[in-house]
Image (spheres, helix red, strand yellow):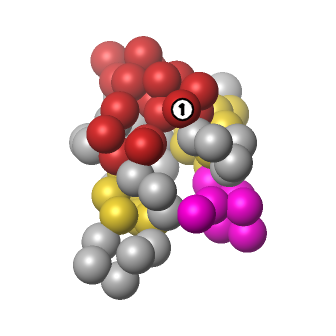
């Protein structure tokens, strides 16, 4: 699985970070960082939750 973020849509509201802190991080500069672009399959449920929670639909998973 590969995590893809559309940074033009992203508002860095950190809902994805709450769902999957192993994969997403909003830092002090208020930008979203993807910590692991290819997270292990064990984190799929968390990443899918992050995708669902994103209010701007800026995150997607590519298999």
Residue 2 picture location, percent across and down? 57, 39
Residue 8 forms part of the magenta stretch: yes
**Secondary structure under the numbered disc 1 in the rendered image:** helix
Q: Residue at x 35, y 46 (%)?
A: 17
| Left/right of residue 47 with respect to residue 3 in the rendered view | left
- Looking at the image, can residue 7 be seen? yes
Query: Which image quarter: residue 34?
Result: bottom left
> Which image quarter holds the C terminus?
top right
> What segment carries the magenta color?
5-11
> Which image quarter holds the N terminus?
top right
- Looking at the image, can residue 36 be seen? no
Name the residue tied to disc 1.
Answer: 53
Q: Is residue 10 above or below residue 53?
A: below
Query: Which image quarter: residue 8?
Result: bottom right
Q: Is residue 26 above or below residue 43?
A: below
* 61, 54: nearer the viewer: 54
Q: Is residue 49 above or below residue 9?
A: above
Neighbourhood count class around disc 1 (C-alpha, 10 Å): few under 14, some 14–19, many 20 upward: some
Residue 55 picture location, percent across and down? 63, 42
Q: Residue at x 65, y 66 (%)?
A: 7
Q: Residue at x 62, y 61 (%)?
A: 10
């Amino acid at each position: 699985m590969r995590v893809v973020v559309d940074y033009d849509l992203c508002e860095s509201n950190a809902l994805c970070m709450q769902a999957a802190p192993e994969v997403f991080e909003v830092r002090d500069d208020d930008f979203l960082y993807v910590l692991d672009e290819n997270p292990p399959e064990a984190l799929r449920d968390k990443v899918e939750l992050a995708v669902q929670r994103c209010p701007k639909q800026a995150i997607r998973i590519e298999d």
